[in-house]
Amino acid sequence: MYRSYSTRSQTPSALNLGVTITGFFLFLTGALLVIIGFFDIFGSWENVRKLAYLLAGAILYKVGLTMIRHYATLTLKRERRRGFWL
């Protein structure tokens, strides 16, 4: 009756789910900081704060993406590709 979409053989633990959600929020925060930094950088190049936005955003983006990929518990099973001739 209830379908699990996890590709892992174990049931997802609370730690995995919590780290996945935290990674997702870090991923979004990093992406937003990078976008804000890019919009802000077109004004002037003198401000060091803009570089900090870009670096912090890129780091948070990569950390969040890594956490999502490592601890992802809500992944869907990929459909196998069919042959060329159906």
Image (cartoon, rainbow, N blue to C red):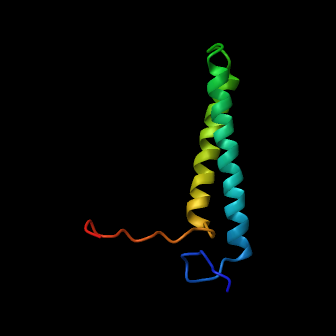
**Residue name at image x 71 percent, y 60 percent:** 21
- The answer to whether 22 appears left or right of 41 in the picture is right
Q: Which residue occupies the foreground of this view, 30 or 81? A: 81
Across and down, in percent, residue 7 comes to 54, 75
Quadrant where the N terminus is found in the figure = bottom right
- The answer to whether 78 appears left or right of 48 in the picture is left
In the rendered view, tell whether residue 47 sits above or below residue 38.
above
- The answer to whether 80 appears left or right of 72 in the picture is left
User: How many numbered discs sit on the rendered protein?
Assistant: 0
Across and down, in percent, residue 8 comes to 55, 78
Quadrant where the C terminus is found in the figure = bottom left
In the rendered view, tell whether residue 3 sits above or below residue 64.
below
In which image quadrant can residue 19 be found? bottom right
In which image quadrant can residue 46 be found? top right
Q: Residue furthest front?
A: 86
**Residue name at image x 67 percent, y 22 percent:** 40
Q: Which residue occupies the foreground of this view, 86 or 65? A: 86
Across and down, in percent, residue 26 comes to 69, 50
**Residue name at image x 58 percent, y 68 percent:** 75
In the rendered view, tell whether residue 11 sits above or below residue 35.
below
Q: Residue furthest bottom?
A: 1
Q: Residue furthest left?
A: 85
Across and down, in percent, residue 52 comes to 66, 30
